[in-house]
Amino acid sequence: MHTCPRCESKEATVVATSPVEGKWEVYLCPVCIFTWRSSEPETITNPEKYKKAFKIDPADIANATNVPAIPERKR
Amino acid sequence: MIYKDFRDFLKKLEEEGQLLNIDQEVMPEPDIASAASAMSNLGDQTPALMFNNINGYEQAKVAMNVMGSWPNHAIMMGMPKNTPIKEQFFEFAKRYDQFPGAVERVDTAPFHEVELTEDINLFEILPLFRLNQGDGGFYLDKAAVISRDVEDPENFNKQNVGIYRMEVKGKDRLGIQPVPQHDIAIHLRQAEERGENLPVAIALGNEPAIVTAAATPLLYDQSEYEMAAALQGAPYKVVKAKDSNLDLPWGAEVILEGEINAGEREIEGPFGEFTGHYSGGRKMPIIKINRVYHRKNPIFEHLYIGMPWTETDYMIGITTSVPMYQQLKEAYPNEIVAVNAMYTHGLVAIISTKKRYGGFAKAVGMRALTTPHGLGYCKLIILVDEDVDPFNLPRVMWALSTKMHPQHDAIVIPDLSVMPLDPGSEPTGITSKMILDATTPVAPETRGHYTQPLDAPLAVEKWEKILTELMNKQK
Ligand SMILES: [Zn+2]
């Protein structure tokens, strides 16, 4: 498990490793769906250096609006 | 002009000197998006980019900026690469009028080479990468998404091919943004009302006719495949999907078949958009991928989108302008000369028109606001005379400088609709709109001193030809 740089959940998992061995891994956070590669700059990979304006509080996710709205079942 | 597949188009670009191979090793981030963004900064004549050596990958190839300049747009149209924009506009309008073209159905396609139905991992199949620093993940933003009308599934014309932003959210999961105004949102609503998943297919790495048709705002029951055929002047080849009755573009590099899960929404974004701002933080539908086919060593085509102008603007500039031109001509066939709605997808549009009488140009502006595209865009309409080329911005500025009288010619209409990605709209989706009439006043409007317009020296056109030839010889 890895720490998500954006929402700081500890639940991110590896979704891909570089075809050429040892170059990088790609992680995905199941809470905020942030995806990053280990070889990216620290402003992306490091929770402390991730841009503040783009941070996500997991508590806010449930309040996000649906686009498009989910229609009522008609049958 | 007809490019049988994506590779055929790339080959033509290369022959024309409009494709640059990058053989040195690049990092997936930030190099590829940086290079594509840099290329957009280098002018409007730039080549496509092919990255052949990407850190961590063995065979991956990534194509960027494929339609990111006027020469590449001209080559897409099968025209000489130095064709002026206005000529490309009129040629596009001519082919648009040939709609519908024919569709040719075949059984197999090059993308059938490799097929996967188990252990699908999009991160392994495609060399995905981040575009902008604030993006929430790796996106597909130049893929054609195909879906059918759920109430009328056999109706070929109601099948939609559109380009929607999609976030890769798992090994076999994508998030999709179907804006309510888009046709796929109609299909999704129908499916969700029934509690059914909506079958979709996603085609990546396409030849340019279907990309262009998919980027053209067509009516709901107009087929993008028939428009692609009209644009390329030859029947358009499609192949059936295996998990649904969707039709797939024959020339694609990669096809993903799947379905949008009914009733499911999940946090998406942000993603840097064509407005030069990020949008996101909303919950959007999810596509589950069930089947993948691709050519061996597929080329991943991606599109850098960010601060305009980028490839997007070249891709949708003329496709946005021509439908508005045709719709205005339906109302005023003898007056409308040309429409340039290329700025931020038509948030600003410039219309060249003749005038029947005083006040006429303003009415043309108001008609533009009520066209289907105008409802969501056209925050500012500029009207210019019939002899002002709306694609020649210095001339448009000249018209604004000399023909517009703010007290009479600047009109603000409060609280009209605009697409919600307009960061200035308040509340979201509502904005005032403005018409600037920079045409010469005609009777009964007699204000100003316009009786002595400057005429060019007599032999200017002849000398344009002579000088162009001399300059070409020098090269
Ligand atoms: Zn997270």
Image (spheres, grey):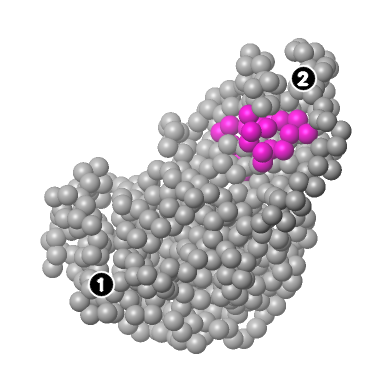
**Residue B441: mark:** 2
Q: Picture quarter containing residue B168?
A: bottom left
The image shows residue B192, relative to residue B9, as above or below, that is: above
Seen as rendered, the residue at the extreme right is: B458
Label 1: state its secondary structure: strand
Please give the name of the residue rendered at 15% of the width and 53% of the height, measured from the top-left corner: A47
The magenta stretch is B368-397
Look at 43% across and 53% down and name the residue there: B37
Q: Is B156 rendered above or below residue B67?
A: below
**Chain for mark 2?**
B
Mark yes or no: residue B348 visible.
yes
Q: In this orientation, which residue lies closer to the viewer: B86 or B16?
A: B16
> Residue A15's mark?
1
Query: Within the image, what quadrant is residue B447 found in?
Result: top right
Neighbour tally class for label 1: few under 14, some 14-19, many 20 plus, Cα within 10 Å: many
Q: Which of marks 2 and 1 is in front?
A: 2
Residue B431 image position (x, y, % from top left):
50, 31
| Chain letter belonging to callout 1 | A
Q: Quadrant of the N terminus of chain B?
A: bottom right
Residue drawn at point x = 82 percent, y = 18 percent: B452
Q: x and y percent of residue A12 in the render?
A: 18, 65
> Residue B417 placed where, x, y %?
54, 35
Tag 2's secondary structure? loop
Vertically, is B393 above or below B316? above
Q: Does the magenta stretch include residue A75?
A: no
